[in-house]
Amino acid sequence: MKQTANYPIAIVDDHFLFASSLSKLVNSYESFTVQFQATNGKDLQQKLETAEQLPKIILLDIKMPVMDGFETASWLQEHHPDIKILALSMEDDENTILRMLRLGANGYLLKDIHPDKLKVALEEVIHKGFYHTEKVAEHLLHSLHQPAKPDKDDFRENELIFMQLASTEMTYSQIASEMNLSPKTIDGYRHELFNRLEVKNRVGLVMYALKNGLIEF
């Protein structure tokens, strides 16, 4: 006979059939029970507001409408940092995995994982605080040996706007006017980005931003 579950789990996935099957699977594990399902980050926010207790772990998909897994993980880190996040996705590329880990995910699993490994992952996240498969460990090790590829989340909105405008023929004074900021503030952005990205001039800044998909022509 199954013991009373100790750890509430939430599932955030917009595919109803998968989420329902996953819910049944998790409920079959001793000491775990699914508290609720949500279809995206916004739906999760609403359900957390009315939940009698917060889930210990959120099984989080990445590609979802309205509010995807990246946005959801970022929001959870800010508003509910004690809730553990276990990403569960079909996306297996290195950049996606590392981005989710940078946003605070305590583990990253592919949706074709064996049910026994999912149970182990839940238990390790509860007791150790994290769970990494061999694949994720390889990506983490690989990332240590090369510079991290920048992501738009690594920059403030005004920095991205500044880089976009810097790719035009506008002068720095015109950029300041366009952004409704003082020339001194624009100079601050310029010096900060030059130093952080290790570029020497405006052309280098624009080339860096284009190469890494931070701006568009």
Image (tube, rainbow, N blue to C red):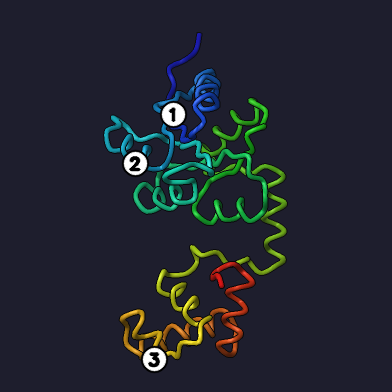
**Label 3 sits on residue:** 173
Q: Is mark 3 in CB contact (under 8 Å) with mark 1? A: no
Who comes first in sequence, dot 3 or dot 1?
1
Q: Position of residue 185 (x, y in %)?
A: 36, 86
**On the rendered structure, is 146 left or right of 33?**
right
User: For the point 53% across and 56% down, which residue is it?
Assistant: 102
**Rendering coords of residue 202 (x, y %):** 55, 87
Secondary structure at numbered mark 1: strand
| Image-quadrant location for residue 45 | top left
> Which of disc 2 and disc 1 is earlier in sequence?
1
For disc 1, the marked residue is: 7
The residues tagged by marks 2 and 3 sit, at their Cα atoms, a distance apart of 42 Å
**Residues at discs 2 and 3 in contact (Cβ within 8 Å):** no
Residue 58 is marked as none
Q: Amino acid at mark 2?
A: Gln
Q: Nearer the viewer, residue 183 or 71?
A: 183
Q: Three-letter amino acid code at disc 3?
A: Ser
Q: Secondary structure at mark 3?
A: helix
Q: Name the mark nearer the viewer: 2 or 3.
A: 3
Q: Nearer the viewer, mark 1 or mark 2?
A: 2
Does 169 sit left or right of 147 as displayed? left
The vertical placement of 60 against 208, above or below, is above
The CA distance from mark 3 to mark 1 is 57 Å
Q: Which residue is mark 2?
A: 45
Which percent across, then down, holds residue 203?
Answer: 59, 86
**Residue 214 occupies which quadrant of the picture?**
bottom right
Q: Position of residue 97 (x, y in %)?
A: 61, 50
